[in-house]
Amino acid sequence: MSAQDSSFVEVVQLSKRFGAELAVREVNLAVARGEFVTLLGPSGCGKTTTLRCIAGLERPDAGEIRIDGQVVTAPEREIHFNPEDRNIGMVFQSYAVWPHMTVFDNVAYGLRVRRVNDAEMKARTNKALELVGLGHLADRYATKLSGGQRQRVALARAIAYEPKVILFDEPLSNLDAKLREQMRIELVRLQHEVGITSIYVTHDQSEALVMSDRVVVMDKGVIQQVGDPETIYARPANAFVANFIGVANLLEGRLLSRSGDVSEVEIPAGDGFAPLHLKAAGGEGASRGQKIILSLRPEDISLHLQRPEGGSAVNLMDAEVIDTVYLGNFLDCRVKVGAHEVTLQIDHFERLSPGQKVFLTFWPDHGLCLTE
Ligand SMILES: Nc1ncnc2c1ncn2[C@@H]1O[C@H](COP(=O)(O)OP(=O)(O)O)[C@@H](O)[C@H]1O
Ligand SMILES: [Mg+2]
């Protein structure tokens, strides 16, 4: 892979202000050719603004954006390419289809505007419609389409003129849950088939984890972590990411010691309870006494009805059942550990009653010490 391929879209030190508010703060991002990268974060964290800067719909205050080696945005040098000169496709949340046109004409529109000759226009439009599974509806008026079909029309239009990059801004969020899950899979299949570089925005963590080659987690205009889905899930860089990506139990304490890859932490358990002494991964670079947040995923905690003995009694905690929720193939169980509330998932169906004493353990490499 050449240097240019590994940074097909480059965003360097991008900042954008709205009045006094810094919506995007020194964002750096390199997207490889053919890669599917997702910007993920809560509402208002600057995802759309970043995407709109890449599209040329927004003028940033500082930074530089390059697409395929071409500088398209550089406010300090007064460079700003208009959206139509960037060779990008866009698919947004609202179905931007024209109701008074047929499916075919909706998709062909962009090619006609670009004065692509008739034969090629027809060929590319039909190919795009086949790709999104709408070939048989080419003559239908857009008013007669379902939400999912309209979004497919928007997608076909975006890919028909073979842009260098497609930008997606929450394209599935207006669809019902079932269709949304189906469209996720279809979109990824299509992206692999066409091999087009994609930058996708969503606030939905499962969508991001399922679809992306890499995920960029943002909060308050700042990138918190960039990584493949496995890394983001298993090794969140900080408490924000751990919390946002999945349900994580976050327990605050202090570092007691470190040996090898294992940190030992002390976590106050509340008035009248002995503090917890637990061993977990992470905490590299932290010093003794430093504040630590222990992240424990619900599926990584084991529940025992009897006090475990010997080798399996690692990170043993006394707990008391608050309640359980049956979730189809597992139980979601809330317990109290001292004054903390901890959520865990168990895949067996013991009868657990509120107030019942139980015991929790977790393997040290399943817990993660975060330092911020
Ligand atoms: N045109 C605008 N004028 C003023 N403030 C804006 C404008 N667009 C976005 N913002 C603000 O910038 C921040 C980031 O917004 P946005 O990029 O839309 O976030 P996201 O897409 O992650 O929800 C928000 O606080 C939002 O209110
Ligand atoms: Mg947005």
Image (tube, rainbow, N blue to C red):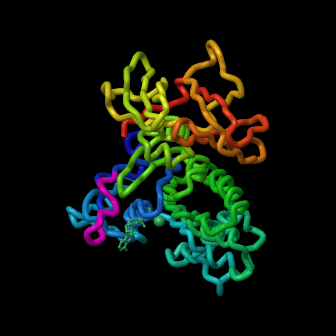
Residue 258 percent location from the top left of the image? 39, 20
Q: Is residue 73 depicted above or below 249 in this figure?
A: below
Which residue is depicted at the point 62% across and 77% down? 106
Q: Is residue 289 depicted above or below 146 in this figure?
A: above
Q: Residue furthest left?
A: 76
Magenta residues, as a range? Answer: 17-27
Residue 224 percent location from the top left of the image? 39, 47
Q: Residue furthest top?
A: 310
Residue 1 in view (yes/no): no
User: Which quadrant contains ligand 1?
Assistant: bottom left
Residue 93 in view (yes/no): yes
Which residue is depicted at the point 51% across and 66% down? 90
User: Foreground residue, 184 or 41?
Assistant: 41
Name the chief secondary structure element in magenta.
strand
Q: In the image, 318: left or right of 368?
A: right
Q: In the image, 79: left or right of 103?
A: left
Question: In which quadrant will I find the N terminus?
Answer: top left
Q: Is residue 143 depicted above or below 288 in this figure?
A: below
Residue 325 percent location from the top left of the image? 72, 48
Q: Residue furthest front?
A: 272
* In magenta segment, residue 20: yes
* In magenta segment, residue 18: yes
User: Foreground residue, 259 or 104?
Assistant: 259
- Counting every numbered tag in the picture gives 0
Which residue is depicted at the point 69% across and 61% down? 177
Residue 29 percent location from the top left of the image? 38, 49
User: Foreground residue, 168 or 298?
Assistant: 298
Question: In which quadrant will I find the C terminus?
Answer: top left
